[in-house]
């Protein structure tokens, strides 16, 4: 069979000078101009650039092209190689709204931070009508409509298609190799999401350790997480090709308070992601709080949208901040009279969690191994906050992509 040639990449949009201009970046790059605007010498950043900056050859933004190309591989995958000027154009037209940063030291754009409260389209008041309309127009099946309604109502969804037994077995064996110390590149966490990754040691297997990014270590894990059975509903929720942005593997789930994936994993600033929990053993148990996704957002340490973003900003005493978050979340659920329930999972079953669903894996009562993998899926154009702190590259797996933290060049100045 003859392969179809790849679709030509679209050109970057052309913008008027005023739309191409980034006032915040211009003032960061030119502190003298910022001081003059503050004194009232110029009405605004644009006023200075329009009168003087353009003719003087000043950049209309503070984008660091080398950093931007190295950190946000999605940009060149979508539009092809970007010149230095095109990096600035991409940032203004696309990156800023996605939560990208102009350079390694730039803050988040305020508009992107405000957009962080939007979540998924199923959270909108008209979501019920939208699902019904998609079904009526035959864009989704009756079954898919019922699943979307269930996710919209509960904030979680047990997938109705079991994962292929052969893929479950292969992923399970790959994780066992890592937990047995047979993969020298594997890294583990022993003290929760604020801990420091460490290599395997002989003391590790009996402990409730967390294996970081097993999807990056074994193709069998990627194939399980990007199987049609697991990605069918996420594609409808995220309306795009998927990016397998991160994963953790567990041999013995640690005992942790119920938390929101949007707070601890973070994944994307705009909370456009879903968390997938796949059971590789029988007798898995997931503590869930239905309808908790409708409770208001709860920041870390008062104003950080998630833990990775707080760590990037240099949060001191993250353990104390996370403990305070857990207490506040517990009070929020209690005030709303939302009680936790236990959801049993058999081998090969999977659950999708809303970013603001309150959930926790429960350890086995006798300490026996209970293997599972937890992953975050987001639109491929977005980049998880944690990936800005480590070298990352995009790889293809079928129609979707996955984030690799190995063999990638570090972002300049990061």
Image (cartoon, rainbow, N blue to C red):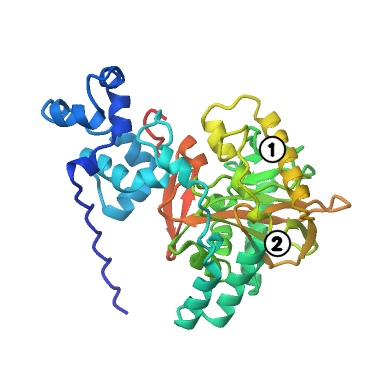
What count of labels does the image hold? 2
Does 230 sit above or below residue 396? below
User: What x and y, as percent, mark residue 78?
Assistant: 31, 55
Q: Secondary structure at mark 1?
A: helix
Measure how far apart labels 2 and 1 are at the Cα level: 30 Å
Residue ID at (36%, 47%): 73
Residue under label 1, please give it: 325
Query: Taking the image as drawn, is residue 181 in sight?
Result: no
Q: Secondary structure at mark 2?
A: loop
Asked whether 222 or 103 is in front, the reply is: 103
Residue ID at (64%, 70%): 150
Question: How would you rate the neighbour count of disc 2 (Cα within 10 Å): few for under 14, some for 14-19, many for 20 or more?
Answer: many
Quadrant location of the N terminus? bottom left
Q: As drawn, is 357 to the left or to the right of 312?
A: right
Quadrant for residue 84, please give it.
Answer: top left
Does 232 sit above or below residue 370? below
Mark 2 or mark 1: whose residue is earlier in sequence:
2
User: What x and y, as percent, mark residue 287?
Assistant: 77, 55
Q: Which mark is residue 280?
A: 2
Asked whether 279 or 216 is in front, the reply is: 279
Quadrant location of the C terminus? top left
Q: As drawn, is 38 to the left or to the right of 155?
A: left
- Work out which residue is located at the far left of the displayed protein and give it: 55
């Amino acid at each position: 069979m003859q392969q179809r040639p790849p679709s030509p990449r679209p050109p970057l949009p052309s913008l008027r000078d005023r739309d191409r201009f980034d006032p915040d970046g211009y003032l960061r790059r030119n502190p003298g101009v910022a001081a003059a605007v503050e004194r009232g010498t110029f009405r605004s950043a644009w006023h200075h650039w329009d009168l003087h900056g353009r003719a003087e050859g000043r950049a209309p933004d503070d984008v660091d092209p080398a950093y931007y190309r190295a950190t946000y591989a999605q940009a060149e995958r979508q539009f092809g190689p970007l010149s230095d000027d095109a990096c600035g154009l991409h940032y203004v037209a696309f990156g800023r709204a996605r939560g990208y940063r102009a350079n390694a030291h730039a803050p988040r754009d305020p508009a992107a931070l405000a957009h962080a409260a939007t979540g998924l389209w199923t959270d909108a008041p008209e979501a019920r009508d939208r699902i019904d309309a998609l079904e009526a127009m035959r864009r989704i099946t009756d079954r898919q409509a019922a699943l979307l309604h269930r996710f919209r109502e509960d904030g979680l969804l047990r997938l109705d298609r079991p994962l292929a037994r052969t893929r479950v077995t292969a992923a399970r064996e790959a994780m066992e190799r890592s937990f047995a110390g047979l993969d020298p590149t594997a890294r583990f966490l022993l003290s929760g999401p604020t801990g420091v990754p460490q290599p395997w040691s002989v003391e590790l297997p009996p402990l409730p350790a967390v294996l970081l990014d097993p999807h990056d270590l074994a193709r069998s894990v990627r194939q399980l997480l990007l199987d049609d059975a697991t990605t069918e509903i996420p594609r409808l929720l995220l309306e795009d090709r998927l990016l397998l942005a991160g994963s953790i593997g567990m041999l013995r789930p640690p005992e942790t308070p119920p938390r929101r994936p949007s707070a601890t994993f973070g994944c994307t600033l705009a909370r456009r992601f879903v968390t997938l929990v796949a059971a590789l053993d029988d007798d898995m148990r997931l503590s869930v709080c239905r309808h908790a996704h409708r409770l208001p957002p709860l920041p870390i340490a008062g104003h950080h949208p998630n833990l990775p973003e707080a760590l990037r900003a240099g949060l001191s005493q993250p353990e104390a901040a996370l403990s305070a978050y857990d207490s506040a979340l517990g009070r929020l659920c209690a005030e709303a009279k939302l009680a936790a329930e236990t959801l049993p999972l058999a081998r090969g079953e999977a659950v999708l969690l809303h970013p603001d669903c309150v959930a926790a894996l429960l350890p086995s009562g006798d300490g026996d191994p209970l293997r599972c993998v937890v992953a975050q899926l987001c639109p491929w154009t977005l980049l998880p906050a944690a990936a800005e702190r480590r070298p990352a590259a995009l790889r293809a797996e079928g129609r979707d992509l996955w984030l690799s933290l190995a063999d990638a060049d570090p972002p300049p100045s990061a």
